[in-house]
Each structure stands twice: as structure tokens, then as C-alpha cells.
Image: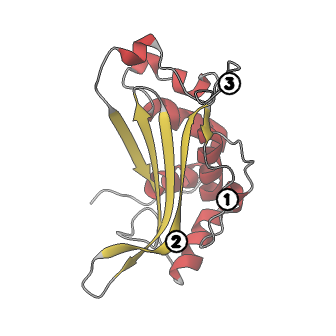
Amino acid sequence: MSPLDAAHLLLATVGSRNVKDSATIVGRPGGLVSSAGKWAPSFVNIPELIGLPADHSFADALEALIAAASNGSLQRAAEELEQAQVDLVRDAAPALNIEVSLYGPVPRGAILIEEIVTDNEGQQHRYRDHWDRHFYGERSVVKKSGNLAWIDIARPAEMDSDLKTVSTFTHRTIATIGALLAGDTPPNTAA
């Protein structure tokens, strides 16, 4: 399995409230495209993510994170930030925090990468301006003009409910999948 296959499987799993519709998030026309352009976090170096083009998709970014986890560059980035050895799966509060969220019923995504520090009282905080967040939405596949040109129109099946959903996973899931793809046995996360 490749990092792209793993990214698609993960998106299909968390991206829909109806199992029968789970693959539609992966193949949705227009894709979920970054509204922020290129990744350029100044506080952490994840080459696979930084190398993405400005019009990259949510699946591209997730693939890049999984590839970084499988080839060790995500681990190296976390250890450079921490200035110590870190276990992205089992450590309770590593300095590198990654949160990936999918919103529904109209698909949207967000990826947050931040540096977390713990103060003398044990409270965790985002370190100064050490964070970067990209939001992902559908790019219009129909040529439009004016101030509504980039609006994503919900499909009828997505409008049948006012129930909003959010599915979120973190660097732990990404690191575990990366370890599996690399052929490593991820640490037992059971307590």
C-alpha cells in the first residue's frame, strides 16, 4: 500500500456519515483544495508537505504527512522541535501537534500543525506564532464569475440534514499508519 492509498482509505473512512457514500469524498469533482496555498511553516521542516504546490488537495496533504511518517522525516521534524527523542504515537504531549479534521455534510477539511509547550504549572499552550493551518474546500468545476465564483454548492443529499459532523485525528494516527507502511510494528497503544 502506498501513502496515497492510505490517505484515500483514511479519507473514505472518516469523510462520510454513510458508509455507502464513503468513497465519494475521495473522488469528489473539484477536490478539497487548499485555500491558503503552499505550506510554509517556519518552525518545523516537513519536506513532503512544504514541497506541495499551491493548489494541492486535502488528499495530497494527507498523503504527504503519511509519506513523511513512513520515511522518517516526520519523526526527525518532531525530534528537532523537541530537541530530544520523541514517540509520536505514545508520548502524551509531544511538542509537534498535528490535527486533521474533516467537516460535513458538505465536505471541508483543515490541517493544523503547531508547536505545543508546557509551562511550569503543567498547562499546555501553543508556542507564540508557531502554528500553521490550512483549510480545504471544493474548488468550483463550473466557470463562474463575480464574488460567488468559489462557492461550493451543497448536493441535495448533503442538505437533507442539519446535523454537522467533525471527524478529527492527530499525528498519532498518521505516525501509526506511517509505521505500518514502513513495515515497522507500531507501538502497542493499549494501556
Residue at x-position 70% and y-position 58%? 50
The percent coordinates of residue 139 (x first, y second) are: 63, 30
Q: Separation of disc 1 and disc 2 at Cα?
A: 24 Å
The percent coordinates of residue 142 (x first, y second) are: 68, 18
**What type is the residue that disc 3 sits on?**
Ser
**What type is the residue that disc 2 sits on?**
His
Q: Secondary structure at mark 1?
A: helix
Give neighbour class at mark 3: few <14, some 14-19, many 20+ (Cα, 10 Å). Answer: few
Q: In this rendering, is residue 10 above or below 168? A: above
Disc nearer the start of the sequence (1/2): 1
Q: Separation of disc 2 and disc 3 at Cα?
A: 36 Å
Q: Nearer the viewer, residue 45 or 19?
A: 45
Q: Nearer the viewer, residue 124 or 67?
A: 124
Which residue in the structure is indicated by mark 3?
145
Residue at x-position 39% and y-position 65%? 90
In this rendering, position of residue 119 left or right of residue 95 = left
**What type is the residue that disc 1 sits on?**
Asn
Which residue in the structure is indicated by mark 1?
71
The percent coordinates of residue 122 (x first, y second) are: 27, 81
Label at residue 25: none
Which residue in the structure is indicated by mark 2?
130
**Does the image show residue 182?**
no
